[in-house]
Image (spheres, rainbow, N blue to C red):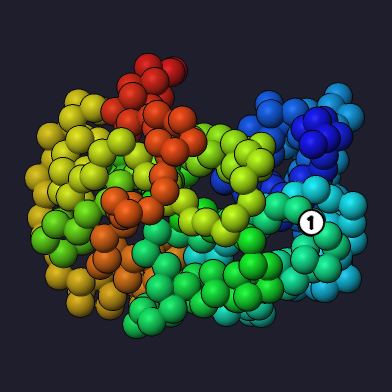
Amino acid sequence: MAAASDRVVTVFGGTGFLGRRIVRHLRLHGFCVRVASRHPDRGHALLPPDDPQLRSIKADVHDERSVAEALADAYGAVNAVSLYVEHGRETFHSVHVESAQRVAAQAQRAGVKRLIHVSGIGADSRSQSLYIRKRGEGELAVREAFADAILIRPAVMFGPDDAFLTTILKLLERLPIYPMFGNGQMRLQPVYVEDVGQAIAKLLQRAQTRPIMFECGGPRVYSYEEFLRTVASAAGIKPILIPVPFTAWHALAWIAEMLPSPPITRNQVELMQVDSASSSDTFGMGELGISPHSIEEILQDALRKP
């Protein structure tokens, strides 16, 4: 087998929240990396300028030719493109199903040896939630086009520049009374984004290629209320948590979606109505030799910084 330094991996969505971490861990593992995005200038701004094994290229997952060119002569590919709010032609179906199938089909045609498709815990083609259903349909489309594709399902991810933990922490600091989603009993297993990036790099380094699914969760499963109290305690805050029915959240989100940058969407509300924890019968971080970082550990580091 060729050395990692001789192998090119194309990362679609490589300038995103997870994508940037995937790129960094691939380089740490010695891979040559193409960061494929519609705005390569962003890639240039985010990537080390003096790394000859790292290239930022223009690619649009909606365009077949563009995808094919990004995959030319690549050993591996990672599709980390995701969408949380629909706008224009950017719909859950166009991104999570059609574009996912396009990347997989072109990877198969280009002779790519390893394809990793990033989905999410709970993806289900039978779900009533449009977002969750399209994630599930995307997984099926990818496997149909590239039979040996590896599916990665992260739980909700957190990190220094996330839209999850950072937002919750700010709200807890500002609101003496904090409105919870429902009764706060939905289960979640937040995972550090750097751990997911490392998991993907390790999977590309492994010789095994049989189709498999990995669910990436953190070291602890919380109820939503437990999670809020854990975050608040780490920050030295003692909020009053008030349950708010999901019907009220859906109405609020419907109104918020009329804004240019909605603070909450109906899709996000739907996601908070289902558990987001890894299954005991699915491969996870342990099989890759990764001990995931806890929320408390990362929070303490973040809160110590000025």
Q: Residues within 10 Å of mark 1 (few under 14, many from 20)?
A: many
SS type, badge 1: loop
Q: Position of residue 206 (x, y in %)?
A: 63, 39
Quarter of the image with the N terminus is top right
Please, is residue 283 above or below residue 109 in the view? above
At 20% across and 58% down in the image, what residue appears? 186
Q: How many marks?
A: 1
At 40% across and 29% down in the image, what residue appears? 291
Quarter of the image with the C terminus is top left
Q: Nearer the viewer, residue 299 or 124?
A: 124
At 27% across and 66% down in the image, what residue appears? 274
**Quarter location, residue 131:** bottom left
Residue identified by numbered label 1: 112
Please, is residue 212 above or below residue 273 in the view? above
Q: Nearer the viewer, residue 159 or 219?
A: 219
Q: Position of residue 181 (x, y in %)?
A: 21, 61
**Quarter location, residue 247:** bottom left
At 11% across and 61% down in the image, what residue appears? 183
Is residue 127 rendered to the left or right of residue 101?
A: left
Q: Amino acid at mark 1?
A: Val
Q: Is residue 134 visible to us here?
A: yes
Please, is residue 134 above or below residue 203 in the view? below
Q: Nearer the viewer, residue 117 or 246?
A: 117
Is residue 24 rendered to the left or right of residue 66?
A: left
